[in-house]
Image (spheres, rainbow, N blue to C red):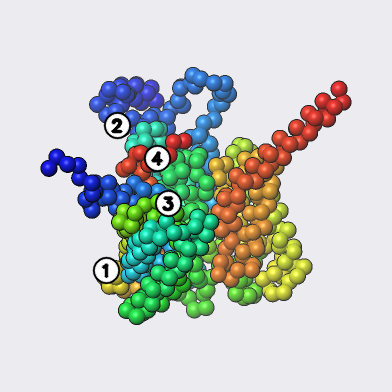
Amino acid sequence: MKALRNYIDKIKPTFQKGGKLEALHSTFEAFETFLFVPNKVTTVGAHIRDAIDMKRTMSVVVMALMPALLFGMWNVGYQHALSTGAVMTFWEVFLYGFIKVFPIIAVSYIVGLGIEFAFAQSRKHEVNEGFLVTGMLIPLIVPADIPLWMVAIATAFAVVIGKEVFGGTGMNIFNPALLARAFLFFAYPSYMSGDKIWVSGMIKGEGIVDGFSGATPLANAAAHHMDKIPSTWDMFIGTIPGSIGETSTLAILIGALFLIITGIGSWKIMLSTVLGGLSIGFLFNIFAVNPFMEIPAWHHLIMGGFAFGAVFMATDPVSGAQTEKGKWIYGFLIGFFAVLVRVLNPAYPEGMMLSILLMNAFAPLIDHYIIEASIRRRHKRAAIAANNR
Amino acid sequence: MSQKVEKEPLFSSKNVKLITDPINVTNPVTVLVLGICSALAVTVKLKPAFVMALSVIAVTILANVITSALRKGIPPRIRIIVQLVVVAALVILVDEVLKAFVYDVSKQLSVFVGLIITNCIIMGRIEAFALGNKPWPSALDGLGNGIGYGVILIVVAFFRELLGSGTLWDYQVIPDSFFIKNGGFYENNGLFILPPMALILVGVIIWIQRSWKRQLVEKN
């Protein structure tokens, strides 16, 4: 450790003003702060010093994603084994999934960080850590068989159009990872929707067991094939077809617990999203004009990407609502619209992505009115106090 | 010989600027942000975009010239109506010409030819320029703005058609063997067919233009 510190201190002048590699200043800075806690102190204004900086925050979220990722890798292999009828041991299954998933993660990080570094150099600011989470989220919300170049393009689109255009990390209106998914969804629909793409190896269609359907529970529900929906237990554990990281509600819950305990993710947004989804679910149960409306409201929470979106996407502190009351409204409407889109729009079996993006757009407006209301309330209180004097 | 030249040459530097400025620093689409709706609607393919650009160029020039010629006789209170009549007449002419000579493109453009009437660029140039200038500069101004609009339209359409359909001017550019269904690796990007991508492309053009022409960047 000491040697590393000494080495970094030795090469530091090369990257500082006047040094040979001054242009790569921000790259150096990124690696230095990645290895060691920065000892920089703010010189102007009042500030609170906290042990947790953006890099630590991001690392916590990435750690919270690990259960979903590991389960996702296993499930990719498991679904493949199911579809081909192959008998595979646990490690073979996991290895299959790992080989499928790892390249997606690598591509997402290489492309995204590459663009981040390039922008940081050209704009002469430090490399922002925001992409650490985005780069992990993108692989988790795509199907395992997606061509890698599509991942690369979507990542580039998300980073450039979703983030850098607005000024980089912390300035974006929309969640970049979801933007990448939305891009893929509209650009290459045949690789992002349908019955064949969710199980690895099914597009080629070789050696698929007779009668095996790769349709996700949501697709089955949307098509009113109620008998084909897997058991509640399967959907909760996550042994169902779907995007890599979204299937296991259990793994996501572990991540959610981790986020809540460390205080990184907002439990208000998670809870209100669930409440929103449940409320519209119950409403559908009351009317119940088609079989999809009849499924128990809480089934929506364990199907598709609802849990994943609620825990990891909606709670994005940049694109979500900032005010405490606003978080309740924001989360509730996400859940509400997600289930609404799912049930009522046959073109989009999964509404979570669209509803979070929609509410991302409205989050500043919600915050604005919450702040206005509280200003007005205080004015009123001040006026009453002045009258009583 | 030393007598001052009273008549300005037809292509004096001031007049040339009337054409070149709208193509770049006062571009109606990227700087004034006018005429966006049609830029989104007709740019899926290169051919309709090109025809649309030509139509708008023709209408802006003629509308500018006619209004400029009439400018002393138009009572200010009813000038908008007069302008509308002029533009509407020209648009109907353009529509008839398109129907006669390029029927298939005319069908693709459908309602958007008629909607040239509401294209803000045309009304904007008449109000801002033709009502206060002589016919010849007005014609040049119309030409410049029409080209400025057309250039953006064609650039956007170029990328949308190439990446969205794999064709240019309806000719297959990306070889068939590249596509996944034929054993390749490539797939057309469906997002480029959808209007939002046109908006994003226009945004990217604005971005590029402003990092090139720094004076266009708004303060704050």
Instruction: Check if mark 3 and mark 4 are on a common chain.
Output: yes
CA distance for labels 4 and 2: 25 Å
Judge whether A370 appears above or below B163 on screen: above
Chain where mark 2 sits: A
**Image quarter in which the N terminus of chain B is found:** top left
In the rendering, which numbered label is found on residue B173? 1
Q: Amino acid at mark 3?
A: Ala
Q: Find out whether the residues at labels 1 and 2 contact each other: C-beta distance under 8 Å.
A: no
Q: Nearer the viewer, residue A91 or A291?
A: A291
Q: Amino acid at mark 2?
A: Ala
- Same chain for marks 4 and 1? yes
Secondary-structure class at tag 2: helix
Q: Is residue B13 above or below residue A23?
A: below
Disc 4 to disc 1, C-alpha distance: 36 Å
Residue located at (86% from left, 22% from top): A389
Horizontal and vertical percent position of residue A194: 50, 70
How far apart are labels 3 and 1 at the CA level?
Answer: 42 Å
Residue identifier under label 4: B217
Q: Chain of mark 4?
A: B
Q: Which residue is mark 2?
A: A23
The residue type indicated by label 1 comes to: Val
Q: Quadrant of residue A258?
A: top right
Q: Which of the labelled discs sits on residue B128, or is there none? A: 3
Q: CA distance from mark 3 to mark 4?
A: 23 Å
Q: State yes or no: discs 3 and 2 in contact (Cβ < 8 Å).
A: no
